Image (cartoon, helix red, strand yellow):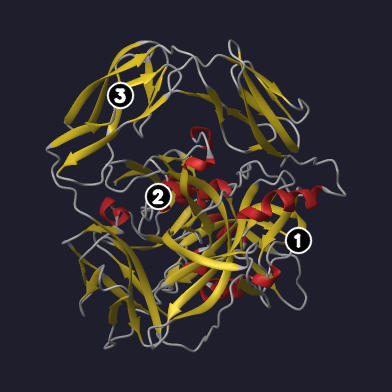
Amino acid sequence: MIKRIFLVILMLFSGLLLVACKNSDIDAAVQPTAVVISSPEQTNSITVGMTLQLRATVIPTTITNITVDWSSNNEEVATVSDEGLVTALQSGQVKITAKAGTVSGYYYLTVKEDIPVIQAIAIEGVNEVFVGDYLKLNYRLTPDVNVAVVWTVDKTNIAEIDQNGRLYGKSAGTVTVTAAYENINTSRQITVKTRTGNPTALTLKGRNLLEAGATMQLLVTTTPVGAVNGVTFTSSNDEIAEVSASGLVLGKSAGTVTITARSTEYDLEANFEITIKDYRIDENDYQNVWKDVLAATKDSIFGVAHYQNNDQGKLVKKSIGSGFVYKTQFIMKDGSIYDDINDVHSFDDVEFYHYYLITNKHVVEGSDALKIYLHAERKEIPATLIQYDTKVDLAVVSFNYTQYIRPLSFGDSDNLLGGERVAAIGNPSGFEFSSSITEGIVSIPRIYMDDDTDNDGINDWSALYIMHNADINPGNSGGPLVNSKGEVLAINTMKFVSSNIEGMGFSIPIHLIQSLLPYLENGVVKQRVTLGITGNEVKTLVENHITETVDSENNRIVFSIPEGIDYGVYVVGVDPSSKAGQAGLQIHDIILTINGRKVWETLDIRSELDTVVPGSGQEVRLGVMRNGVLEELILTY
């Protein structure tokens, strides 16, 4: 990634050096320059017992008679043959490497267990619950495999059930609970009973930590179970937190408060202490705003350590970057998994926390292991690379931890304006500088930079960035660029450095990242469709009076642009096997529109193609000028 952008920028800005925020060495004399691994099936996951043929392309493609060495970093999960045939052996993740000379390409695969045909479902658990109480139902499949079922109840006025099988009794009566997987299902009747009898003790259940502005429902439990639980609630300090008649607590300001529940009929009470954390930031307090932003975000921002196996098979730290937690899964002691903190009644019920972290592709690519640096404890813990994108410098990493970490919120990068204040947070130059913050302003809210993502010497992608002047340095890669509310606007990726250039940092906007997260979280790389052409923007040719060029085979091409045409993309090369080639697009055609949208830049084509799903049968309509006549070509994907 560093080398590719370096070459592109040298072509665009004489005397500039573009540096990614990761420590790495570059040897510009190395030949070949890259190895690109691809799969005809365009998949990043296979099931146990299956095979997957991978193909290695050595760049430049003019190199012949070069040996490609294939290897797997975990042969218990999958092996790879000398011809690149992967055989899946057991579930897990594996890195496949193809090495040519001194350069390597990597392909990360997830191996999953094959799911057999489900023959039966059995619901396990008791058959009754009291009004106001919860009941956890479990299930067992035949054969015994770990797949999720769908839970439903027939009478939601009597009881509700979530997709973890947790049922809540709302009113007295009987409901039928059904667990289903595809076309197999089973049912059981559950009785919701009226609460009766004298309680001997009351207990309040809730989370002992709450954010100001957030709410939390407290639960009243009784000894014995099912006894009358009518109570009144009070707060020891309504300025810190207030509580409603139903036990809904609203955090109002930082501090510690005690909520008391007193029985309406008996001389009993229960107390529950809650700490309120106030992460809200006064944007108008210019003197303290970034201090408050750092305090609100630093415990969610971590170091990412990249490890590789050395010749002796031992893990060695190669580089570091930054990353931040954006999503939490709560793995409960009863086997439930929740994504929403409001579904967690008490942190005491949590077995551990499963976190999702965003960082840069170039921080993790090629790693055999990753570790997360916890700056508060000054230690590293194991992490797992889920997947990275092949076009955008983005990766998603996961890790488990025994303490709750607050995920950072996303801001609005779509409507960002130049001049807005931002700050970069991360680990510049090492973990000893963790939680470092630098402030600046947005210079350009949307800027595109061409990139050669596969190192074949041809720019194949236009990367979108936010340009800003907040200082970023090696180690900042993957860390957040935040606004004065503490919201993440982008992830820091690279900067220009030169003896006469300062303050040109580039970050990937969060709205672009959000569109890719559903793929990466599931170990999938988004497949992009292409036209299969090379071309030049007409406006650039006209404005600069460019009359000719040469194609990839050094053939001379003389531009012929009709009078009055100042937009479009002039086609100088067509891959005959591509969709454009199959539709009849030719050299010297000018693409004026795509799906009715006027084409001023190649980015207009790229943004339209981004909406197309490979294999979906979607049509893309090109308005093409050929020999002065407007034609329409239809490409089917």
- Choose between 592 and 402: the one closer to the eye: 402
Q: Secondary structure at mark 3?
A: strand
User: Who is closer to the viewer here, 393 or 619?
Assistant: 393
Q: Would you place residue 336 above or below residue 477 in this image?
A: above
Determine whether label 1 and label 2 are within 8 Å by CB. Answer: no
Q: Amino acid at mark 2?
A: Tyr
Mark 3: few/some/many CA within 10 Å (<14, 14-19, 20+): some
Cα–Cα span, label 2 and label 3: 28 Å
Mark 1 or mark 2: whose residue is earlier in sequence: 1
Amino acid at dot 3: Thr
Q: Nearer the viewer, residue 312 or 419?
A: 312
- Asked where in the image residue 621 lies, by quadrant, the reply is top left
The amino acid beneath tag 1 is: Thr
Mark 1 is surrounded, within 10 Å at the Cα level, by few (under 14), some (14 to 19) or many (20 or more) other residues, namely some
**Residue drawn at (44%, 78%) of the image:** 308
214, 619: nearer the viewer:
214
* Marks 1 and 3, the one that precedes in the sequence: 3
Q: Nearer the viewer, mark 1 or mark 3?
A: 3
Secondary structure under tag 2 reads: helix
> Distance of mark 1 from mark 3, alpha carbons?
51 Å
Q: CA distance from mark 1 to mark 2?
A: 31 Å
Residue carrying label 2: 519
Label 1 residue SS: strand
Q: Residue furthest right?
A: 287
User: Residue at coordinates 25% horizontally, 25% vertically from top-left?
Assistant: 178
The vertical placement of 2 against 524, above or below, is below
The residue where tag 1 is placed is 438
Residue 279 picture location, percent across and down? 71, 42
Residue designated by label 3? 152
